Image: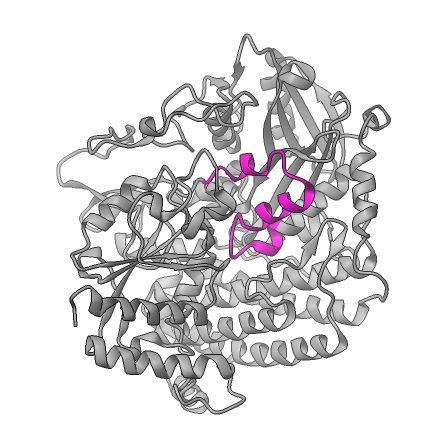
């Protein structure tokens, strides 16, 4: 996952980004760091995946005296939120950004406080108490005869996460949707800073409930890459099993939950019942219904015995049979299909331009799957199909999930058959030795990527997994003592959320919950 | 339609009975809890406690477990509990998350909109004391930093059985609030 790193002057950035984008490269992440103390700069790293499968990182060093940089959003729409986030959290200004409104920190936050700067001091508590009349940030409005604005949220009527949606509509027809997110921003990237590797894992695993395993494994992989550790084969297979168990309870539950968007109670109760069955299996295997606590830097903490593997296969066979019956009924129901088909279409070029990943990308015909693109855990050993559907509508996203459940079950079976014997993790002593070995080891690492060429004794690594929602990228920088200096988390929800509002105009207001459920993105994964 | 009916009939009632047989999915811990809950809701509430969910910045783990209470296995609605769409209809607020600064105002307004007497439950480690967000620049570090809390439910996240146990505690609090 390492590639080339090239330091680039700010003036040359737009042309280089344009060339990369035109050559088919995809922006995987953009990481802003405050490295004034270690090397005298703010650094921005633009990580691209090349069509060849390689990685190219553009490193932009910003002098602390001039905290502006050229926005590449006009050339590469996928960069829009990365640049706004860097503006909020590091106080670096993207010049020429078409929409430079604050993104992550909402009204109560006083300007001039940048949490990811190393010399950040939190604003006084009294400054953070919003008055009743705290001004809302300006947002685009739809005006004209007969138009109405429908504000919804951040507290919603159902049990869902908080976001504010403002529909511009004529009658029931949506003309425009503005989504305001980041309400659940908890500052978790900052929380990880200064922590040791194990405590950092506790934070990473709690970014999201439904993507716990994916975040934990991405984090562990990033740290392992930074430290040059290779995990035992059995651990790689167990990680694969845990990742697929997470995908299964999510996909099965999501297919059921989409039915709630059209009032199809048979599907809702069937899906939620099978999800409960799978979560009880999770608890039986790991002691946790969301599979938390099973991962470790250097492998996994929870082995699976023959008996546990047998239990797993029994339950998965039952779920497979019942899920098959459920989806057969679902796809045969004409009133459900009428609502699903042609609703909430995500066009392939929109998906491409915004860097959409995961189920949403695959349902718009883009064959992006981190399990195939960045073979991690044991996915390199296990053949599987990257499922795509061309239509880009609600039905396509449901179909992708249904077909992926079958793939996941096959992957899990193959992983059980291929499960090697041996240790499940490196010893904590081995990990600790590698962490401390980074003292002064930086020079040996020059040129092998991840941007650590000029990072002195700081080491960096990137870990990528396929969460139930898509490619989930963790980037870490470790200080010479083996503590977390920076954790940058770019979840699938981060790339996919900007696409959701584009799919709603042209549909009616009551279709929005259905469209939203079909994407089933996490607010917590996005907001952190 | 025939296929749907056949499936529904063949699966039958999966909801766990308060008097669940040994070996059922409920396990030994859940059945007595459900029985106690059933008796208490009848006695104290005449079968009705309305709950409003407030996400104050959770990781969605607590919220998914709350949702699980409505699946056919737990089916909390049969015991007189329901999740309502508006705080104006609620007796109890289940607050998940540490109260982020971005949600502080929404939480305060939701509490204000809930009629008295009301109960506030802090659900999950983050809601109780900030959890992994404790000390963060972006969060208040727990629900009780912003509004008074009646019931604390630790866990990351609390399981559905934990939440049922917490609801029993909530019911014990109600008579003291003058509801009788």
User: Is the magenta region chiefly helix, strand or loop?
Assistant: helix
Q: Quadrant of residue A148?
A: top left
Q: Percent x, y for residue A16?
A: 64, 20
Camera-side residue: A283 or B154?
A: B154
Confirm whether the magenta stretch covers residue A198.
yes
Confirm whether the magenta stretch covers residue A193.
yes
Q: Residue at x 51, y 90 (%)?
A: B22
Name above or below for residue B167 compared with residue A521. below
Name above or below for residue A214 compared with residue A35. below
Q: Residue at x 58, y 81 (%)?
A: A318
Q: Percent x, y for residue A514?
A: 36, 58
Which residue extends farthest left?
Answer: A145
Name above or below for residue A79 compared with residue A188. above
Camera-side residue: B74 or A95?
A: B74
Q: Residue at x 52, y 36 (%)?
A: A353
* Left or right: residue A482 compared with residue A93: right
Camera-side residue: A240 or A342?
A: A240
Q: Quadrant of residue A304?
A: bottom right
Q: Percent x, y for residue A243?
A: 64, 59
Locate the C terminus of chain B and report the quarter of the image it occupies. bottom left
Any part of residue A113 in sight: yes
Q: Percent x, y for residue B6?
A: 42, 90
Image: magenta residue range: A186-215
Locate the N terminus of chain B and report the quarter of the image it occupies. bottom left
Report the number of discs.
Answer: 0
Q: Residue at x 45, y 91 (%)?
A: B10
Any part of residue A331 in sight: no
């Amino acid at each position: 996952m390492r590639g080339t790193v090239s330091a680039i002057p700010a003036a040359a950035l737009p042309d280089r980004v344009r060339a990369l984008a035109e050559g088919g490269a995809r922006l995987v992440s953009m990481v802003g760091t405050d490295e004034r103390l270690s090397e005298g700069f703010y650094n921005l790293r633009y990580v691209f995946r090349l069509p060849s499968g390689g990685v190219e990182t553009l490193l932009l060093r910003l002098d602390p005296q001039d905290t502006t940089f050229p926005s590449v959003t006009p050339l590469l729409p996928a960069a829009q939120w990365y640049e706004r986030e860097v503006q909020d959290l590091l106080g670096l200004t993207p010049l020429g950004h078409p929409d430079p409104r604050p993104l992550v920190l909402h009204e109560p936050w006083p300007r001039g406080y940048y949490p990811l700067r190393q010399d950040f001091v939190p604003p006084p508590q009294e400054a953070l108490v919003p008055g009743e009349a705290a001004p809302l940030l300006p947002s685009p409005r739809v005006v004209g005869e007969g138009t109405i604005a429908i504000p919804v949220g951040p507290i919603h009527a159902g049990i869902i996460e908080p976001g504010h949606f403002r529909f511009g509509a004529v009658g029931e027809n949506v003309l425009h949707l503005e989504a305001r997110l980041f309400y659940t921003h908890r500052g978790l990237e900052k929380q990880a800073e200064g922590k040791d590797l194990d405590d950092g894992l506790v934070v990473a695993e709690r970014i999201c409930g439904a993507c716990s395993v994916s975040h934990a494994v991405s984090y562990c992989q990033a740290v392992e890459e930074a430290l040059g550790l290779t995990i035992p084969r059995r651990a790689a297979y167990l990680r694969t099993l845990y990742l697929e168990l997470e995908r299964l309870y999510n996909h099965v539950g999501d297919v059921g939950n989409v039915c709630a968007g059209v009032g199809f109670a048979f599907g809702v109760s069937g899906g939620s019942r099978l999800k409960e069955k799978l979560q009880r299996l999770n608890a039986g295997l790991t002691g946790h219904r969301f599979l938390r606590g099973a991962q470790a830097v250097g492998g996994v903490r929870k082995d699976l015995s023959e008996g546990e593997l047998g239990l797993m296969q029994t339950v998965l066979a039952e779920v497979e049979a019942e899920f098959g019956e459920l989806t057969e009924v679902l796809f045969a129901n004409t009133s459900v299909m009428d609502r699903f088909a042609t609703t909430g279409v995500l066009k392939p070029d929109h998906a491409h331009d915004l860097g959409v990943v995961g189920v949403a990308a695959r349902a718009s015909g883009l064959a992006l799957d981190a399990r195939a693109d960045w073979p991690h855990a044991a996915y390199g050993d296990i053949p599987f199909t990257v499922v795509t559907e061309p239509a880009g509508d609600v039905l396509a996203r449901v179909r992708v999930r249904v077909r992926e459940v079958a793939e996941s079950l096959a992957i899990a079976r193959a992983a059980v058959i291929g499960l090697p014997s041996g240790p499940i993790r490196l010893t904590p002593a081995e990990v600790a030795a590698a962490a401390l070995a980074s003292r002064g080891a930086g020079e040996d690492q020059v040129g092998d990527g991840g941007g650590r060429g000029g990072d002195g004794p700081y080491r960096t690594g990137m870990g990528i997994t396929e969460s139930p929602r898509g490619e989930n990228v963790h980037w870490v920088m470790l200080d010479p003592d083996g503590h977390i200096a920076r954790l940058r988390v770019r979840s699938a929800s981060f790339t996919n959320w900007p696409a959701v509002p584009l799919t709603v105009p042209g549909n009616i207001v009551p279709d929005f919950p259905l469209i939203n459920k079909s994407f089933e993105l996490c607010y917590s994964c996005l907001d952190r | 339609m025939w296929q749907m009916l056949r499936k529904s009939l063949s699966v039958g009632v999966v909801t766990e009975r308060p008097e669940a047989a040994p070996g059922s999915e409920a396990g030994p811990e859940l059945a007595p809890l459900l029985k106690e809950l059933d008796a208490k809701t009848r006695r104290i509430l005449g079968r009705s406690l309305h709950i409003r969910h407030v996400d104050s910045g959770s990781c969605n783990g607590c919220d998914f477990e709350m949702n699980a209470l409505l699946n056919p296995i737990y089916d909390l609605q049969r015991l007189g509990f329901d999740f309502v769409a508006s705080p104006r209809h609620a007796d109890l607020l289940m607050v998940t998350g540490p109260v982020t600064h971005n949600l502080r105002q929404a939480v305060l307004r939701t509490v204000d909109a809930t009629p008295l007497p009301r109960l506030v439950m802090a659900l999950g480690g983050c809601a109780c004391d900030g959890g992994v967000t404790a000390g963060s620049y972006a969060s208040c570090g727990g629900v009780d930093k912003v509004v008074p809390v009646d019931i604390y439910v630790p866990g990351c996240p609390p399981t559905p059985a934990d939440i049922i146990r917490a609801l029993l505690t909530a019911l014990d609090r109600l008579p003291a609030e003058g509801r009788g």
